[in-house]
Amino acid sequence: MSQQDALTSLLSANAHKLLRNDLPTPLYHQMFSLLRDRILSGEIARGMRIPTEFDLADSFGVSRITAKRALDELAAEGLVERRRGKGTHVIHRSRPKPMHSPLTGLIETLEVMAEHTRVKMLQFRRAVPPEPIRALFDTGPREPLVQAIRLRLRNDTPLGYYVSWTRTDNDEVFNEARLANTARLTLFKEMGIALKQVEQVLSAVNADAVAALHLKVEPGTALLALERRSYDAEGQLVDLLNIQYRPDQFTYQMTLDMESDIQAQG
C-alpha cells in the first residue's frame, strides 16, 4: 500500500468497521493505535498530513472530541505535530528493523578484503578522543584510546578512508604494523577479546576536504559510509570504525539464504 493509499483508507466507507464498541478499549485509543501503527510502519510517512478531526470523526463514525483525543495522543507520543491553521503532520521518521547475520561471516569477509587489498597507514597514535567519542566508550576526560587513520587501496587506487578508535592496552598485538596487514577482528581474537555483537550502519555522505584528498575525488562527491561498533561479552564498546568508500570502487552485497532463515526461525 502506498503512503497516499494508507491515508485514503482512513477515510474509506469501511473505516468505521475498524473500531469496535464491544471492546473495553476506548474508541479514541483504538483510533490512536491504528494511526500509530501506520506511522511506525512507514505507511504514513514523515511530512504527510493527517485528515482533520472532522474528517476522521465522520469516517470512523465517532465524535470530534474522540478524534481530537486520538490526534492529541499521537502528538504526545512525538509522532505528529499539530499546528493551528496548518493541520496535523507526521514528524516521526520510520526506520527499518536491523538485519542480523552471523559474526563469523563478517570476519571471513574482512579477512578476504585484507588479502586482496593493501593499507596505507596515515596516522596511528594513542590519544584522548573528543567528547562525543568518549561518550560512546564511556571513558574519562583523560583516558586515551588508540586512533588509527588508514587508506585502503586496490591496485594503487584508493577505495576506502578509515578512521577508528579502539579500547586496548595490548601494544604487542594491536600495533601499527599488524593493523596495516591484518583484519582488526582477527586481532581482537588474538588478544582474547570475545566480541558478542557487531553493529553496522550504512549511509551516504558527501566527501569532506580531507576524505576527498585521500580518496582522490572532488569534495562533495557522494560516498558510501559505514559505521561499525564492536562490543565485547560484557556489552562494552571495544572498537568504533567509520569508513567512507568510493562507490566506483566498492559495492556492498548481501545474500539471504531464505531456506536457512526459515529453518532458524522455525
Image (tube, rainbow, N blue to C red):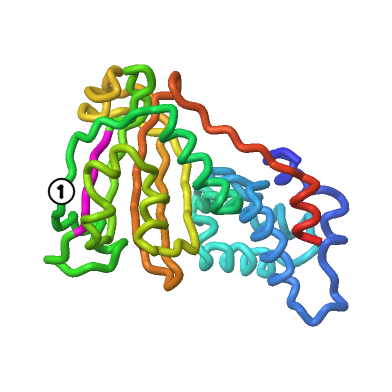
Q: Which residues are magenta?
A: 145-150
Report whether 195 appears left or right of 262: left
Q: Position of residue 195 (x, y in %)?
A: 45, 61
Residue farthest along the bottom direction in this orientation: 24
Q: Decide: is 69 above or below 81.
A: below
Q: Name the residue rendered at 62%, 69% in the picture.
A: 69
Q: Name the residue rendered at 49%, 60% in the picture.
A: 197
Amino acid type, callout 1: Arg
Residue under numbered circle 1:
125
Q: Position of residue 39 (x, y in %)?
A: 63, 53
Q: Position of residue 21 (x, y in %)?
A: 85, 74
Instruction: Depth check: give the residue in front, 61 or 10.
Output: 10
Few, some or many C-alpha atoms within 10 Å of disc 1 (few <14, some 14-19, many ≥20)? some
On-image quarter of the N terminus: top right
Residue 206 visible in the shown view: no
Quarter of image, res 15: bottom right
Q: Principal SS element in the magenta part?
A: strand
How many numbered tags mark residues here? 1
